[in-house]
Amino acid sequence: MVFVLFVSVSGLSKRRQIPFTMSRIQGKRQDTLSSISETGTLVSESDEKPARHRTSSSQHIHSQSRRWKGDNRARHGNAWKDNPWKTCHRLTHRHDHNMVKAQTEEVQNLLIFASLFSAVVTSFAIDSYKFLQVDPEGKVPDLLNQILESLSNSTNEISSPASDPTVDKTFVRINIYWFISLSLSLITVLLGTTCMQWLREYKHLGSLSFKDALILRNLRYEGLIKWKVPFILSILPFLLQAALILFFAGIVELMWTLNFCVTVTIVASIGLAVIFMVVTAVAPAVQFLLEEGRESTSPAEPPCPYRSPQSWVCLQAAIRCKIAIQRIRKCPCWNFRSDKKKGLCDVFMQAESWFRYDLTWSRNLRTTEIHTRGVDIDLVHGLKWMAKTFAENMEAVQAVHQCVRQLDPITGLSVCSVLRNGDFTMVDEYAQSASSVICSGDEEIEAIAQDHISATILEHFVTVSPQFESTLLPLRLELYSKSRAENLRVVVPGLPRLRCPDVGGDGAAELPIDLVVQYLLYVERLLLHAASLPNWGSYDEDMDAGWKLMCSVMHNYSSFDPRGAEILQTVSRFLRSNKVFITATNSPHLKNIIQRLYLDRVYDCLDTFLSFYNTLPETTAIESDGELKQSIELFVVCLCDYGTPYSHPLFQMPGWLEMAAKAKGRLPEIV
């Protein structure tokens, strides 16, 4: 009786050493797919229940191996201590400071040169204009001759006086050259001082928050480019060069005269400057009147950056005249055609400076229209400019990524679209297809979309700057595995397609082990859902990356690793899920994947595979070691029994044949 009891207990103990079998994998680990409504909202989901282990250490291992879900938290990547908006503001402020400083110094140098040059030209012009005057003493002989002729011929008709002697055209040309040169130098001074006023207003951001300062700065920067301010600054040196050339041409001619042609030429040159000053003074007022009466859903253009005291006076006069006309006429045709723009003149009337005017423009003509679509165009383009300008700066890359993570998903999706397409035209299509699901109020769906958007942003930076691939690999792999794993449950439309990170490079060896474990858990779940996935071809890269990571774990495994048991258990689960995938495959396409992935990969890393297998003990005294050894043998036997693969070069390798024979010999025991 005692002997029978002992045998029963021994058999039970031996059976308990055997890990979960294939039926437990298919029964306990098979996840129930979530039912999703037409809008993509998660309706129900069966919680994934892990296999129950008997030892406290196993329970701890399993708790550490639990799959990460979309919770809007990044566990890898450099810790970000500073405010990302502050970093973006600091970088843009430094860029703008350097840009404005360079332009200001250049304009100041031009003004100094123009002032000195004008003094030199003036000294020549003062003497040269005298050559245009006829000598009065030369007219006396002519007058005496006329008097004598009139006395001698008193009966004859008095002849008309002789015409004034003409001035040599050489003097005319010389004075034209010198006076135009003097006019251009003075015009340069005039334009330079005006541009200095624009640049001063461009730098003034007040005491806004870092995010609002970035929005306002991008608004002004686009206006600066749109209204050709850099071009205007660039023509100042050409004006001085032209003035210098004309001055030298006048020296060659050496003559000047006063006549109508000179007056017209000088007036014409000065008139151009006057017209320019008038246009720049009234341009903000004209743009405001056009935008105020515009009936369109598209965003308004950036405000005119021609900022000067005279343009401010013209703008205020235009606003007051518009308000007065509306109040006097009381005619529907003078009212605003859009309810959204009612009282716009009254709102702009409250702006007491260009700074307040820009804020009012952004909040009433740009932000308000775009917020009907859920997107702030200036914020999107500001981050796009950051990503494009500082693509080689790792600090800027991290700052832009953190800023996008703090945005709402629709705005973050717009940033992705602008970065990929380079234009804002595709944002509407993305927003329309994704907004109904992302904006449904489900925090889980928003977290999934946020992880996906963050991974897309990092993918863009790696594409533009490949030198950051190894640095960003841990964070990219974490976000990618979380996003793809959650996508197996909930499909969010409108999200851009992600590319699997390259785990075969130099950075793969430095990946944290918990990150590798999480990715293998994702691939395990992917294999268990393979039969129900509509587009299996999009997951080929994921499986390939999972196999590379498993081989990397085998190659770098050390029995002294404190998390060695967890690593072995994860690899075991990964191999068993691969076996389930192979045995359940009926699709010809999936069979080709198996042929390419498993047989070719095992053949490529056979030495690592055999070395790792031979380091495991024959006995099952250690649960994790024995479980993994059995999983490897099950996987090997499964590959040997799959179809007719014996034509593959793998089956000609002695090491593989020996391991396969050993696995088949132990198969009855482990099954």
Image (tube, rainbow, N blue to C red):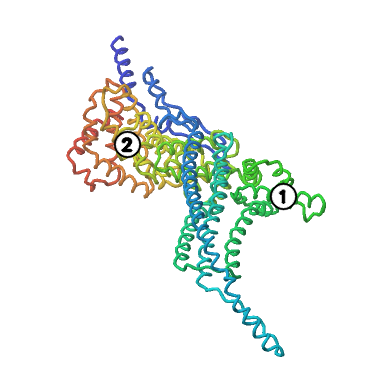
Per the image, label 1 sits on a secondary structure element best described as helix
Labels 2, 1: front one: 1
Coordinates of residue 101 in the picture (x, y in percent): 48, 43
Q: Amino acid at mark 2?
A: Gly
Coordinates of residue 467 in the picture (x, y in percent): 34, 42
| Residue 354 relative to residue 124: left or right | right
Per the image, label 2 sits on a secondary structure element best described as helix
Answer few, some or many: residues within 10 Å of disc 1's Cα (few below 14, many 20 plus, some between 14 and 19): some
- Examine the rendering and report whether any part of residue 608 can be seen: yes
| Residue 337 relative to residue 34: left or right | right
Residue picked out by circle 2: 507
Coordinates of residue 40 in the picture (x, y in percent): 56, 41
Task: Please give the name of the residue rendered at 78% of the width and 56% of the height, measured from the top-left corner.
Answer: 333
Q: Amino acid at mark 1?
A: Ala
Q: Earlier in the sequence, mark 2 or mark 1?
A: 1
Viewer-closest of 454 and 19? 454
| Residue 8 relative to residue 665: left or right | right
Find residue 317 and name its label: 1
| Residue 457 relative to residue 624: left or right | right
Coordinates of residue 347 in the picture (x, y in percent): 71, 43
Find residue 174 and name its label: none
Name which quarter of the figure residue 659 lies in.
Answer: top left
- Examine the rendering and report whether any part of residue 445 can be seen: no
Q: Is residue 531 above or below residue 9?
A: below
